[in-house]
Amino acid sequence: MSNLPATSFQPPLRILMGPGPSDVHPRVLAAQARPTIGHLDPAFVGMMDELKGLLQAAFRSDNEMTFAVSGPGSAGMEACFVNLIEPGDTVVVCVNGVFGGRMKENVERCGARAVVVEDAWGTPVDPAKVEAALKANANVKALAFVHAETSTGVESDAGALCALAHAHGALAIVDTVTSLGGIPVLVDQWGADAVYSGSQKCLSAPPGLSPVTFSSRAVQALKSRKTKVQSWFLDLTLLTAYWGGGAKRTYHHTAPVNALYGLHESLVMLHEEGLDAAWSRHRAMHEALKAGLEAMGLGLLVAEQSRLPQLNAVTVPEGVDEAAVRAQLLARFGLEIGAGLGALAGKVWRIGLMGQSATPRHVMACLTALESVLGEKVKPGAGPAAASRALFG
Amino acid sequence: MSNLPATSFQPPLRILMGPGPSDVHPRVLAAQARPTIGHLDPAFVGMMDELKGLLQAAFRSDNEMTFAVSGPGSAGMEACFVNLIEPGDTVVVCVNGVFGGRMKENVERCGARAVVVEDAWGTPVDPAKVEAALKANANVKALAFVHAETSTGVESDAGALCALAHAHGALAIVDTVTSLGGIPVLVDQWGADAVYSGSQKCLSAPPGLSPVTFSSRAVQALKSRKTKVQSWFLDLTLLTAYWGGGAKRTYHHTAPVNALYGLHESLVMLHEEGLDAAWSRHRAMHEALKAGLEAMGLGLLVAEQSRLPQLNAVTVPEGVDEAAVRAQLLARFGLEIGAGLGALAGKVWRIGLMGQSATPRHVMACLTALESVLGEKVKPGAGPAAASRALFG
């Protein structure tokens, strides 16, 4: 064992402006370092009740079944599918990026049939195509789509898509991993039935937890299942006895105590700021970044009306080695931005302005760093000045 | 939103001597509070490589496929079953407590047949019964058992059971949630094929991660599958590209960065102490606690030869309200011990001496607190004195 590390890991200081994790506030880091207590301790149970209320507020929902899955966003995604979808079901899945494709995988691994509605990467889900798919297939159990595609920076019209699902008697399963806390996520107003998110995007807690919420329609579908949920770990009927049991709470699994301290703190901070104010801040930082990028001569992939403020897909200029640029940003400034995925690999950078990473400091740091690394490929001095004007007049 | 908490959660100070989580060292808490960095950051990738080596050492295994599942022990359990077991398979499952029962649930939710070998709660798995079951059933895909039953405090003979599995051409799936770091877990020597554990027991990291290790036989079984793994989140073929990919690591899910800092630090501490020294410490603390309990007139449920040092099931004396005692221990001293589960509810307390909770301070705190709360039900002054003699002569 002599070649093993016997020293603590000291992470370098970074500025996180990729597709998540975003920068975590010292208050949240400090919360994670508070002493661990038992997952059935009355004090912890009280904290869980608070957390439920904070998540309901963030989701704009009164759903009783609202909690944090003890795993990352992909576990939250799986929780939605394995609980609602049974073998033989038909699910219309909208694919306009990586995460729609992952939904399709989930549907198929539940033994169900996925009817895929495809849209080009970088464009939103087309409601007309969705309506056609819902009409063309009998007894569609659910419509599944990504509200904010992290792989492309596109927002789809969640309200319209949920309405289409309901008009055809289907449940609406919605990925809000990158949207929750950054742009309006209006679960009850949309009528979304099963919604999952992630802790590490616009909520700015460390990665590892997936907030979820389920409508009464979804609960009814769960109760009407003919088969057992294929995952024991993610079985909502069992999880509810732990998260929803109040004083009679029964043991299911050992909750990630300290991670939940962190998520609680990040939601308290969101509550202090106010959800509307947080949405406005994300929008304002995006406008400033966009002004700076455009002044430098850089373009955005996504058309203006469906651009996510918190995830900016920036077109890599002709003749630029995008990976080398990211490596230089990291080496010179400790600045992390994201690469393109799948069809967009090599073609875009993904610049996140999420949660605690959506500040004027971040916008300016990113623009000056890009200017330093891109050199003569961009117009000198123009970016930060334009961003400053957008921010402060 | 006016009735929402807008204040940070401040956990009370506890002494954790239940069945887990155990007390977390300030070094580990501090590690969790270090700045979050990206899950694909070169510095983070280096930390993951170190973590793999530390886990291999803790498991006493050279298995390449060794990592931490991004979820609690029950996610680790599910990872072992969904990857190795296919619909129609037969699995012999040993049930001598809660967690064996959970294994059976996992087998059935994979569409496989569980042949249950039952032993009384509080006794170890009987190898003769296991052998009979392996002989009586053709083509058994795996034998699954719990090394250290957290619900009863019993150790089963993992080496003998793994040997039986292999003699009958079956894989050995082993739960070491409560054993890893507390008593010998000798994965390669046993020949165990799929082994999972938890971060919050004898490793004394916060709950939420599940170390796992898979033998080359298990990897072969995974590669020979006829069907897709039913869980996308836990699919080892995908996870391996992230954990095992070295510099070519590909994105699967966003790893729980700060939780992994904590696990890394707890494993560095275990490495500093030495695995053999940690096992001896757990044994010595158990001997001291046992001496104290017996001197007070309290008995242990499990026969001496199969008692786990780190999880002590203590018989509740006649006429004592066990829940009231636990409530008093918590109220007076902030001391958490565990209740009995299932068949043992109301009949035993479960006192953990795990990881950082296996110290002379904990032994003495527990005995003096029990004496304070039980009053005339126990012999006054005898417990702590006997423990002190056992510890220091």
Image (cartoon, coloured by chain):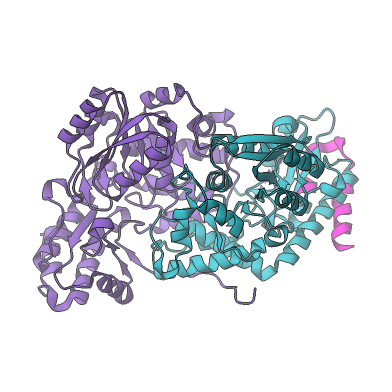
Chain colours: A cyan, B purple
Residue A240, image x, y percentages: 47, 58
Quarter of the image holding residue B163?
top left
**Foreground of the two, B281 or B169:** B169
Q: Quadrant of the C terminus of chain A?
A: bottom right
B152 sits left or right of A228 in the view: left
Residue B335, image x, y percentages: 30, 68
Residue A376 highlighted magenta (yes or no): yes
Residue B364, image x, y percentages: 21, 66
Residue B11 seen anywhere in this rendered image of the structure = no
**At 82% across and 47% down in the image, what residue appears?**
A306
**At 38% across and 62% down in the image, what residue appears?**
A38
Q: Which residues make up the magenta segment? A: A366-393
Residue A92, image x, y percentages: 68, 40
**Vertical order, A117 against A215 (above or below):** above
Residue A360 highlighted magenta (yes or no): no
Quarter of the image holding residue B291?
bottom left
Residue at the extreme front of the image, as rendered: A138
B292 sits left or right of B351 in the view: left
**Foreground of the two, A35 or B47:** A35
Q: Quadrant of the N terminus of chain A?
A: top left
